Image (cartoon, rainbow, N blue to C red):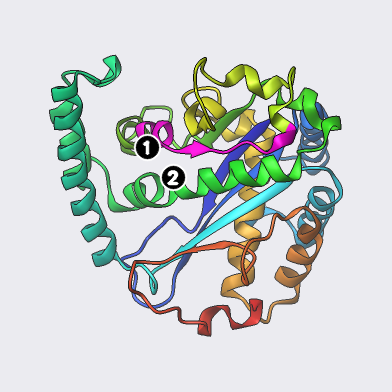
Amino acid sequence: MIFASDESGGFQLDRVGFDPSVWTSIICPTSLRRRVSDQVAAWCESWGIQELHTRELEDEQRVEVAAFIGGVDVTWTATVIDSVHMDGSGARRWRADQMVKFEEDFAASEVRGTMHQRYRGRGDEFRRLLADERRVPLPQFVQFGIVAPKHIFHSAQAALRRYRDPTWAPDWADQYLVFDRKDVRPEGGQRLAEAILYPTLASMTLNLPAEFQLAGHPITKTMKPGRESGISLLDFYGGDPRFEDSRANSIIQLADFVAWSLRRRITHPDERHARTLISLLRSSHYRTGGLGFHLFMRTGTEFDRTPYRHLL
């Protein structure tokens, strides 16, 4: 099972007024990967492009892509964060709280002797990543330090519910999580993911539905011996997430398409084209809550329905 993620909006929470950012994941059964890749390659050849950059496509091309995603057995999930329900000052307070939690957890791990080998002696490096916006700009922290853990957890839950039928069992032989790599060099966001996101995922536990606990089911092979219940989220994804160039990964390109389409629908409530795209995508959407997606809100913030009224 393949989980490919991309975003639209850039997580710029310092902007004045309402500015949403959308992170989506396409969940693609392994058996469908070739079909998806062939279709994306065919579009690129037919349209004379190197990859699907959604904002650069013609309206009729976007409609064709949306119809394909909505008509094949992939699933997508979405998380939205905006500058009204979590502004830049709120994100910085969250960052400061993360720094305190990191110091506590890091010190406790050293005392207990449970520090993972990959993190030993790297405390100062991780402190700089958490504390210094010059090393890790706020948008990257928002993506990987705030939004990512819950979004990745919800995507795993969606996959377990959507593909629980035994006919999908072969697609669970292995699974991996992949993010769009924005730069050929390891950027701050990627280093932050290693420092903060991966340990967080390792500490989160998924409870497997009964269908996945049957003897011989492929996913049980990813569970560590002796674990009494559930499975580590990092184990579920087969280890560390990957960062790959979107040009070489067609499923990331589709994740970008869905993220752009949903953000367009949010920010252009009266636009017919955006409404058409989401209508076509809806059949493959794993909907949650009244909005159909997870809205990330700072604790204590009251929901302002105004920007989302057309989606309720």
Three-letter amino acid code at the position of disc 1: Thr
Is residue 132 visible in this depiction of the protein? no
Residue 91 position within the rendered picture, expressed as x and y whole percent measured from the top left: 29, 60
* Mark 2 and mark 1: Cα distance apart in space: 7 Å
In-image side of 258 versus 200 (left or right): right
Locate residue 63: give its quadrant: bottom right
Which of the image's four quarters has the N terminus?
top right
On residue 200, the disc is 1
Residue 190 position within the rendered picture, expressed as x and y whole percent measured from the top left: 37, 33
Q: Are marks 2 and 1 in contact (CB under 8 Å)?
A: yes
Which of the image's four quarters has the C terminus?
bottom right
In-image side of 310 versus 241 (left or right): right
In-image side of 187 versus 151 (left or right): left
Is residue 94 visible in this depiction of the protein? yes
Q: Is residue 163 above or below residue 12?
A: above
Q: Which residues are magenta?
A: 198-211
On residue 68, the disc is none
Locate residue 291: give its quadrant: bottom right
Q: Residue at x 76, y 62 (%)?
A: 59
Residue 53 position within the rendered picture, expressed as x and y whole percent measured from the top left: 63, 47
Q: Is residue 107 magenta?
A: no
Locate residue 67: give its quadrant: bottom right
Tell me which label, 2 or 1, sits earlier in the chain. Answer: 2
- The answer to which of 219 and 189 lies nearer the viewer is 219
Disc 1 residue crowd, few under 14, some 14–19, many 20+, Cα 10 Å: some
Q: Residue at x 44, y 45 (%)?
A: 149
Residue tagged by mark 2?
149
Q: Residue at x 37, y 27 (%)?
A: 185
Three-letter amino acid code at the position of disc 2: Pro
